[in-house]
Amino acid sequence: MKYFPVFLDINARNCLVIGGGSVGTRKALALVESGANVTVISPAVTDTLKSLARRGTINLKTRTYCSADMEGMFLVFGATNQETLNRQIYQDAERLNMLCNIADRPAVCNFILPATVKRGDLVIAISTSGKSPAFAKELRKHLETQFGDEYATLLTLMGGIRSLLLKEKHAPEEHKPIFNRIIQSGIIDLIKADKKEEIDTLLRIILGDGYKFDDLMGLDHG
């Protein structure tokens, strides 16, 4: 199987989780974090899911799944320990051309989830195409030691710089050598050491006046 790697924009999309145990809870939380409209269906659910439902964060239905629950959904996670139900979920999703993932059952999925390392807006995805999830998790642990919180700070800083540069009149393609110079300057080590004055000096050398660390970190990059 050759998978096509992709990051999905699920903001404000309707997503379904079937199963209210620990796995279903993790799937629901991940969907909420990405801005999805989340519905969870399960006769029994964790306290975390109950709390999310009370706050209006998710739509919780404490009953068994039926095929009609798929209507209007963008993707579905099956997180049950019932093989017959898992296969029904997959078949219903396939009939509707929906994205479907059944936890730990790659044979009844049309997409699988990578192991991920997250540092703010930096997301590193690792996949073994289903051959060895254990190895993917081991690689994730290794990468977690290499990429610390300074990379999240770097991306926020670069976003602020990009926002200011886009307000200038020259063509956006002229920004590439500027970004490359910043990235190759050793700025990540300065961020890790919290040397803001040295960062400001570096930015002034590369970009000129008007680019200060604290100001750039506070910009709205939207």
Image: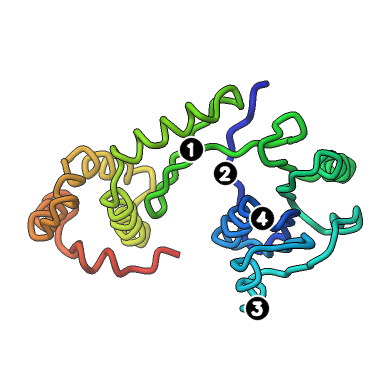
**Closer to us: 66 or 176:** 66
| Residue 123: percent from left, percent from top | 44, 45
Reply above or below: 149 against 105: below
Spatial CA distance of label 1 from label 3 is 33 Å
Q: Name the outermost residue toward the bottom.
A: 55
Question: Please, what is the three-letter code of the amino acid marked with disc 4?
Answer: Gly
For disc 2, the marked residue is 7
Tag 1 near tag 3, CB within 8 Å: no
Tag 1 near tag 4, CB within 8 Å: no
For disc 3, the marked residue is 54
In the rendered image, which quarter is residue 177 located in?
top left
Spatial CA distance of label 3 from label 4 is 17 Å
Mark closer to the chain start, 1 or 3: 3
| Residue 25: percent from left, percent from top | 62, 57
Question: Please, what is the three-letter code of the amino acid marked with disc 2?
Answer: Phe
Reply above or below: 139 against 220: above
Question: Residue 169, can we see it?
Answer: no
Callout 2: helix, strand or loop? loop
| Residue 98: percent from left, percent from top | 79, 45
Left or right of 106 on screen, residue 34? left
Find residue 21 and name its label.
4
Reply above or below: 98 against 10: above
For disc 1, the marked residue is 125
| Residue at (81, 39) in percent of width and height | 83
Left or right of 50 on screen, residue 208? left
Disc number lying in front (1 or 3): 3
Disc number lying in front (3 or 4): 4
Mark closer to the chain start, 3 or 2: 2
**Crowding at mark 1 (Cα within 10 Å: few <14, some 14-19, many 20+):** some
| Residue at (19, 65) in percent of width and height | 210
**Closer to us: 188 or 175:** 188
Tag 2 near tag 1, CB within 8 Å: yes
